[in-house]
Image: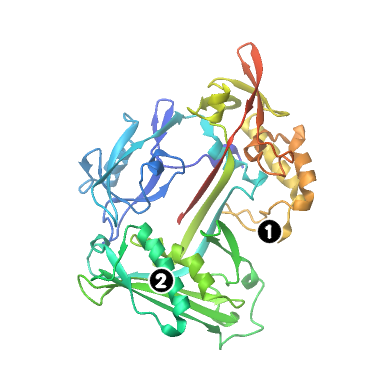
């Protein structure tokens, strides 16, 4: 768990000792329906210029600084996006709502040896798994698209098929959920000659082929999926993807399709269907609430036809605006403008002697070693009922046991544990039982020494995307 291994890997350019990141990730599309051979946005870095510019997931990059991408190779596109002579660029993008939209991206440029609090929050996330974690999950979605070579940006409006009056409440809820996701993408609901007609289908019942004694211990493992509405991972009564059907007491099917009303009327252009094996009864409304946003993530850009992998990154951490020198962590490599640290008077080049009562004159290897030791020493203070596996494959991730918060706090206060970076979670009761989120930084600047009180901002970052 060396800190160096946790530095975020994103598209970046290096100019002398400066690294600039555009704030987004992309993939070259091989879809005949969406941005064929062009870059499509697959991820946005929270709080980046790319995010604030209005760039969105699945946007197609049409041109970079006025240069059309149509006839460029992947290498040429990468070179334009990572032009080391420019700190900003203008992208022309298209999506379901608009085409030819221009966005100005200011790249995030920092010294190559600088490590940010965003990166450190993930590096030390076992201090506060309640606040920060990376997790993977798979949904048994089957997504199919038409074989016709048409672009999905031809379809701008939609309507729903007539609902079944016997299930009016359920179908109205499902349709409203789908409408919410599609309008986010720029589509418009209309009753006047819609481009798309949306049909839904669903089924839930006991499994007639269920073998009561056939479920193994692996089938009983917890299944977690992320609920965007709840803002967290939920433990759901689903068998793992790939389980044998006879081991499931219940079966559930849920899906919806987009039917062409404009170009080839009656043609299904896109369909997503889920077939789930359940260990217990489950409401279709609850399934729709969690899974419709996930299913819609593959429209209009489909990456997987079956068993879609998702990744969630949830971070809540104290932001002061300080970046640290990875080669000498007590040295401040950079301070963001207009940040809490800048407001307090902290400057690049300052040496941090202590954060609270925790000394900083240790190498990244020493911090990493102490961090692993801290995890081992405090494992008994965690709640076994909350256990999960994170995206790095660590199987013993658990939240803190609330009854053990005083012991946890004592462990954070112990100087021997080298927990200086626990200030990133100083807003939590297990790190800081006092409850006042203000951090004391003891700074050495030349021959002068001074205590600076920084009042951080709690940053909340949530990213969920098709992996």
Q: CA distance from mark 1 to mark 2?
A: 34 Å
- Name above or below for residue 107 compared with residue 466: above
Report whether 70 appears left or right of 158.
left
Instruction: Report which residue position mark 1 lands on.
Output: 386
**Residue 434 percent across, percent down from the top left:** 74, 38
Report whether 7 appears left or right of 382.
left
The answer to which quarter of the image holds residue 458 is top right
SS at badge 1:
helix
The answer to which quarter of the image holds residue 16 is top left
For this orientation, the residue located farthest to the bottom is 208
**Residue 263 percent across, percent down from the top left:** 19, 70
- Name above or below for residue 312 compared with residue 278: above
First reached walking from the N terminus: tag 1 or tag 2: 2
Residue at screen point 56% across, 85% down? 207
**Residue 278 percent across, percent down from the top left:** 57, 76
SS at badge 2:
helix
Instruction: Report which residue position mark 2 lands on.
Output: 175
**Residue 124 percent across, percent down from the top left:** 62, 41
Residue at screen point 57% across, 83% down? 246
């Amino acid at each position: 768990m060396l800190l160096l291994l946790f530095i975020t890997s994103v598209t970046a350019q290096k100019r002398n000792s400066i690294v600039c990141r555009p704030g987004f990730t992309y993939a070259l599309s091989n879809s005949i329906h969406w941005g064929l051979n062009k870059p499509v946005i697959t991820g946005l870095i929270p709080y980046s210029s790319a995010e604030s510019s209005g760039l969105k997931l699945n946007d197609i990059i049409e041109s970079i600084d006025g240069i059309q991408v149509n006839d460029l190779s992947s290498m040429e596109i990468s070179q334009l996006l990572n032009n080391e002579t420019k700190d900003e660029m203008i992208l022309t993008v298209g999506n379901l709502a608009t085409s030819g939209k221009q966005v100005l991206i200011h790249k995030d440029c920092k010294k190559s040896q600088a490590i940010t609090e965003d990166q450190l929050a993930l590096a030390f996330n076992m201090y506060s798994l309640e606040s920060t974690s990376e997790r993977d999950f798979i949904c048994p979605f089957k997504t199919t698209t038409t074989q016709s070579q048409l672009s999905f940006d031809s379809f701008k409006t939609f309507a729903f098929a007539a609902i079944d009056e016997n299930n009016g409440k359920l179908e109205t809820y499902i349709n409203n959920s789908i409408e919410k996701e599609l309008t986010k993408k720029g589509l418009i609901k209309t009753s006047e000659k819609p481009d798309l007609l949306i049909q839904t289908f669903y089924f839930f019942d006991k499994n007639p082929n269920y073998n009561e004694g056939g479920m193994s211990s692996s089938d009983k493992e917890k299944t977690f999926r992320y609920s965007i509405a709840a803002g967290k991972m939920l433990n759901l009564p689903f068998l793992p993807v790939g389980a044998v059907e006879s081991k499931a007491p219940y079966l559930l099917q849920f899906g919806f399709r987009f039917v062409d009303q404009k170009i080839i009327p009656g043609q299904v252009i896109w369909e997503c269907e889920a077939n789930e094996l359940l260990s217990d009864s489950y409401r279709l409304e609850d399934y729709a609430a969690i899974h419709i946003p996930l299913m819609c993530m593959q429209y209009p850009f489909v990456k997987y036809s079956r068993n879609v992998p998702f990744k969630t990154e949830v971070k809540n951490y104290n932001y002061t605006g300080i970046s640290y020198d990875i080669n000498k962590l007590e040295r401040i490599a950079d301070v963001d403008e207009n940040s809490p640290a800048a407001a307090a008077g902290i400057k690049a080049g300052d040496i941090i002697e202590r954060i609270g009562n925790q000394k900083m004159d240790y190498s990244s290897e020493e911090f990493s070693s102490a961090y692993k030791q801290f995890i081992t020493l405090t494992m008994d203070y965690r709640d076994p009922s909350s256990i999960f596996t994170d995206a790095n494959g660590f199987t013993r991730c658990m939240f803190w046991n609330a009854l053990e918060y005083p012991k946890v706090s004592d462990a954070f206060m112990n100087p021997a544990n080298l927990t200086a970076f626990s200030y990133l979670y100083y807003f939590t009761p297990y790190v800081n039982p006092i409850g006042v989120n203000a951090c004391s930084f003891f700074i050495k600047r030349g021959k002068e020494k001074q205590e600076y009180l920084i009042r951080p901002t709690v940053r909340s970052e949530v990213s969920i995307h098709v992996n």
